[in-house]
Each structure stands twice: as structure tokens, then as C-alpha cells.
Amino acid sequence: MSAPPVVDLPIEDERLAQDVSTGLAAVEKLLRSSVESEDAFVTEASKHLIEAGGKRFRTLMVLLAAQFGDPSAPGVVPGAVVIELTHLGSLYHDDVMDEARVRRGSPSANARWDNTVAILTGDYLFAQASDILADLGPELIRIQAQTFSRLVQGQIRETIGPKGDDDAVAHYISVLADKTGSLIAASGRFGALLSGAPADVEERLSRACEAIGVAWQLGDDLLDVASDSTESGKTPGTDLREGIRTLPVLYVLASDGSSRLGELLAGPVADEDVEEALRLLRAHPAMDQARAELTAWVDRARADLTGLPDIPAKGAFLALCDYVVERSG
């Protein structure tokens, strides 16, 4: 018997699948109870995104990393909840900054209530994460603080944008590494540390998870252009409509900015021009350039994973690398 796919990733090893399934259930239970408040409204707002679902991608990273030590160690599940609460708290804030109306197929918290409620709810989740973290020890607290610092700095750099002499592509990748990769790296590190895995394994897992996180986001960039479905959770062309300069767009603007496609991508693409922009971008060499960058990050992850002990979790991580490439088309 195998566990249900997580992030569409079936786990072949029966025992590992069961361990992950059990761990996910335990994390989900603690995640929900950790946001309970005496104030019914605080509880409702805090559970809004939890109940909307989500991939629990970072939870999976913690649980797989813990396999390299003792996966039943008492800190593993609380550590995964800390990571998930941090991620969820950042989503409440992201939706305010992006003025998003929908999150995970449901109205965003700022749309359902208002920006103030969304911001304060995100703060509450960060506080609850810190409360759990206090029982896990100073080393984990330091890792969380350093990770949070990277998350904030990445968001600031994204908001401000590259300086005049900055390379736009390098700036973009650094933002992805800090905004997304850092918390996924922390997921691998938490799982390894809390399970008592060796230090060299911890370092490899942290680096590999960060690379997988960056590659995953680059895959979302490609899906927004190449997909005819809603694989990325968004309607294709959403980033173009919002004027978000993803990696393929940056490559076009750097090499072909004066073309018809370059003109379309210079700002938010009007609804009537989205189909033309998608057609031109799908045929542009920028898509292959972006796929090559994604592959380079996956190869970086594989290089670290190859040196890990040969257990089923290693195979699951390598399968995840394959999946990240495959989902991007």
C-alpha cells in the first residue's frame, strides 16, 4: 500500500510512503491546533488558508530529510509545522502586497476581510511558529531567524527591482533563491537536524532543497507560458497580464526588446494581446534558455543528493528532481 501522491509525486517504497503519510497527518493535526485561539475570529482567519489546501511541499521536504536520521524523533513534526506556519504567514502578506483576490481557489484573506486583517493574521502565524520553535532549541531558532531574514530581503529586492547596472536575470534568480529557496532549504535542514542526521547530510540536504525550490519556481514561470491547463494553479498568461517579468520575459527583453514580442512584454499585456504574446513567446529561444536554467538548478540538487546514503528517501528526492523537470514541459 502506498501513500497518496504528494505534489503529484508517488512514493514507490511502501515503508517510506507509510512514514510520509503518517507524518503528513500528524503535521496537519498539529498545524490546525496550533492556530486555535480563544478569539473565534482569529481562529477563523488563521485557518482560512490552511483549509484552502495546498501542496504541503515544505512539509514533504522536512519528512523526507528526517529519513536520514530518526524520522520518529519528537521534534520532526513540530519542526514541519514551524516551516508550514512560516510559509502560510508569508502568503497572507504576499496577497496584500500583490493585491491578490484569490489564493488556492478561494478568496484571499485580504479580499474576504481587508488588508489589516490579512497582515495581522500573518503576524499571528509567525508568532505561533515562534512559540513552537522555542521548544526546539537555540540552533533551530537561529536557522529560522536567518531564513526569515532572507525571505524579507528577497521580498524587498523584488519590490525595489534591480538597480541600473544590475543584471536583471541574476537579480531575479537571487530573489527566487531568497524568497522561495531559503525556506525550502530550511525544510531540509530542519528535517535533518531534528532527526539527528549527520552534519554532512544536513548540509547536502539544505543545498539540494534550495536548488529544488528555485527550480520549482522557474518551472512555474515556464508553465505560465507553455501550459494549456492550470497546472501551475493559474490561468496561462497570468504573469503576462500582471506585468510580472519572469525568466523567459527577462531573456526576451535582454536580447530582443525591440521586436513585436519585446514591445508586448515591456509592461502588463492587455487582455486582447495575451494570446499573441503567448504564441510568440512559446516559439522564442527564451523558453529554451529558461529550461536550461531550470535544468542547471536541478543538476545542482542532484549533485548533492548523489552523495547521500542510499536509502529510499534519496530515491524520492531524485524522483522529485525528475518531476520538477517533467512538469515544466
Image: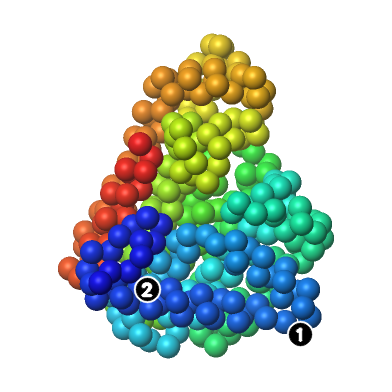
Q: Can see residue 304?
A: no
- Residue at 67 percent of width and 23 percent of height: 270
Residue assigned mark 2: 21
Residue that mark 1 sits on: 38
Residue 279 point in image, percent of width and height: 48, 20
In the rendered structure, the answer to whether residue 97 lies left or right of residue 196 reads right
Residue at 41%, 57% in the rendered image: 7
Using the rendered image of the protein, determine whether residue 105 is visible from the camera's viewpoint. Answer: yes
Q: Residue at x 72, y 68 (%)?
A: 45
- The amino acid at mark 1 is Glu
Task: Give how far across and how far down residue 157 sits, in percent.
Answer: 63, 46
Give the structural element (helix, strand or loop) at label 1.
loop
Mark 2 to mark 1 CA distance (whole Å): 30 Å
Element class at badge 2: helix
Residue drawn 45% across and 61% down? 57
Q: Quadrant of the C terminus?
A: top left
